[in-house]
Image (cartoon, grey):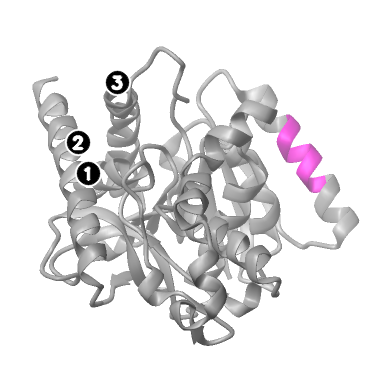
């Protein structure tokens, strides 16, 4: 049994994530961590979730704190805290704002929970995963981000609809940045175990439109309902369950890449990785030539943004 901490638990994603995480059979305690001043909301969440757990028959202890030091003893720490991007804020301003939050939290986590796995959700997630890795002092396998896991699931859903099959029959991946330069791996996409380009219907698929729909999915949801909650929350729980269950699944997460993909790396970015109770390990893969070029461009983009954030943090 394990303890899971959620930092940023008073936010939409953090608070919802506690619900599916509580259903994981390996979790017997959840700690909700919010910033000082949020004590009343945290107590309200605790009481509401306890009622929910009782109604569902879930035997999971729930507590809250406004002190990150209390994450001590947690096996998985989910970091969702951070500022949301405003209409007038550019990507780098958001990155620097959230990097300050992540750096401070990661340093404290590094002091209090040396054996934990640190799971980053805060955006821009690839850059924040690098910040968390550096400031926690953890080994690379202990720190990972949601990355393109949810993007891959969104593409999977679109393909299931297009081919009129159950989503379990679709296997696909998006790698690279969780953002504009994401790269769909058509070479690794199968429907019912058959490579997608071997199916006649593939030639009629609006591939560019489907990928653009995935890229814009979060923004579209925010425009309609104000925030993305349920998709990220369930994706977070899937990864927590995969870690604690020692499942050895291959999922596409943001992790430190050395040279596993065509000798491209030196940054945290979305790639297929083996996920188990030890953490995450990128796996070596070979891509088609056009995918290699697109992935290299995505890595270069994230590496430049990460370097700039580190440079600005070092100035402060």
Label 3 crowd (10 A; few <14 / some 14-19 / many >=20): few
Position of the N terminus by quadrant = bottom right
Mark 2 → mark 1, Cα distance in angstroms: 5 Å
Q: What element carries label 1?
A: helix
Instruction: Please name the residue that numbered disc 1 is placed on.
Output: 302
Q: Quarter of the image holding residue 179?
A: top left
Q: Quarter of the image holding residue 258?
A: bottom left
* Residue under the image location 53 percent in, 33 percent down: 219
Q: Which of 311 and 192 is in front in this view?
A: 192
Mark 1 → mark 3, Cα distance in angstroms: 15 Å
Which numbered marker is on residue 93?
Answer: 3
Mark 3 → mark 2, Cα distance in angstroms: 11 Å
126 displayed left or right of 61? left
Q: Any magenta on residue 67?
A: no
* Residue under the image location 62 percent in, 36 percent down: 221
Q: Do the residues labelled 2 and 1 touch (CB within 8 Å)?
A: yes
Instruction: Please name the residue that numbered disc 2 is placed on.
Output: 305
- The kind of secondary structure the magenta stretch mainly shows is helix
């Amino acid at each position: 049994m394990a303890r899971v901490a959620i930092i940023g638990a008073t936010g939409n994603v953090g608070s919802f994530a506690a619900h599916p995480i509580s259903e994981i059979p390996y979790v017997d305690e959840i700690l909700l961590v919010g910033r000082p001043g949020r004590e009343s909301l945290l107590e309200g969440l605790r009481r509401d979730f306890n009622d929910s757990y009782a109604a569902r028959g879930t035997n999971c202890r729930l507590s809250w704190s406004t002190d990150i030091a209390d994450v001590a003893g947690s096996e998985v720490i989910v970091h969702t805290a951070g500022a949301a991007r405003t209409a007038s804020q550019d990507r780098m301003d958001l990155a620097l704002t959230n990097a300050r939050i992540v750096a401070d939290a990661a340093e404290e986590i590094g002091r209090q929970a040396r054996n934990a796995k640190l799971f980053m959700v805060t955006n821009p997630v690839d850059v924040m995963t690098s910040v968390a890795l550096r400031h926690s002092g953890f080994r690379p396998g202990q720190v990972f981000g949601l990355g393109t896991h949810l993007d891959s699931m969104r593409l999977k859903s679109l393909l299931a609809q297009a081919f009129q099959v159950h989503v379990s029959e679709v296997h696909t991946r998006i790698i690279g940045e969780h953002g504009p330069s994401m790269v769909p791996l058509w070479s690794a996409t199968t429907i019912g175990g058959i490579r997608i380009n071997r199916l006649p219907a593939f030639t009629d698929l609006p591939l560019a439109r489907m990928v653009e729909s995935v890229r814009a999915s979060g923004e579209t949801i925010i425009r309609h309902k104000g925030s993305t909650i349920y998709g990220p929350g369930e994706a977070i729980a899937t990864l927590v369950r995969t870690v604690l269950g020692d499942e050895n699944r291959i999922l596409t997460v943001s992790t430190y890449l050395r040279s596993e993909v065509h000798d491209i790396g030196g940054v945290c970015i979305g790639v297929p990785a083996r996920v188990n109770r030890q953490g995450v390990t990128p796996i070596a893969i070979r891509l088609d030539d056009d995918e290699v070029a697109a992935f290299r461009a995505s890595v270069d983009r994230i590496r430049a943004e990460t370097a700039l954030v580190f440079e600005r943090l070092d100035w402060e």
